[in-house]
Image (cartoon, rainbow, N blue to C red):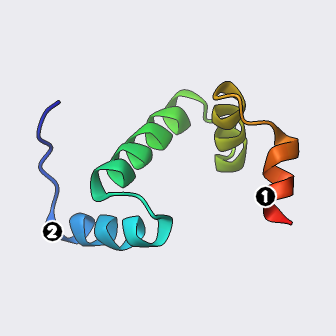
Amino acid sequence: MGIVNIDDELHDNLRRASSVSGRSINAQAGFWIKIGMLCELNPQLSFQELVARELAAAGVSPVSMRAAEA
């Protein structure tokens, strides 16, 4: 693990986003980094497609996701 220097405005945005998503600041930063990397590696996929693919890879089924929304 290392230290990443980011500017104050990005850190403030990170703090706000983490409170909305229920993640820690570090977990939110990790999520943004992972999604950004996946976007660069898969420019043909939308954000929703990337997230769905990652959820499927983690073994989360669409049926259980729809049941949680109801």
Q: Residue at coordinates 85% horizontally, 54% vertically from top-left?
A: 66
Judge whether 62 appears above or below 21 on screen: above
Q: Residue at coordinates 32% horizontally, 64% vertically from top-left?
A: 14
Judge whether 53 appears above or below 21 on screen: above
Front residue (pair 40, 30): 30
Relative placement, left or right, of 24 versus 43 is left
Instruction: Identify the residue under disc 1.
Output: 68
The N terminus sits in image quarter: top left
Front residue (pair 61, 47): 61
SS label for mark 1: helix
Compute the Cα span from label 1 to label 2.
36 Å
The C terminus sits in image quarter: bottom right
> How many residues crowd around disc 2 within 10 Å: few (fewer than 14), some, or many (20 or more)?
few
Relative placement, left or right, of 39 versus 28 is right
Q: Residue at coordinates 82% horizontally, 46% vertically from top-left?
A: 64
Relative placement, left or right, of 9 versus 34 is left
In terms of image quadrants, where is residue 12?
bottom left
Front residue (pair 16, 50): 16
SS label for mark 2: helix
Residue 36 locus on image (x, y percent): 45, 42
- What amino acid does circle 2 point to? Asp
In terms of image quadrants, where is residue 7?
bottom left
In terms of image quadrants, where is residue 30?
top left
Q: Nearer the viewer, mark 1 or mark 2?
A: 1
Residue 49 locus on image (x, y percent): 72, 41
Q: Of the numbered discs in the image, which one, if any, rests on residue 8?
A: 2
Relative placement, left or right, of 4 versus 59 is left
- What amino acid does circle 1 point to? Ala
Q: Residue at coordinates 72% horizontally, 36% vertically from top-left?
A: 60
Residue 3 locus on image (x, y percent): 11, 40
Residue 16 locus on image (x, y percent): 35, 74
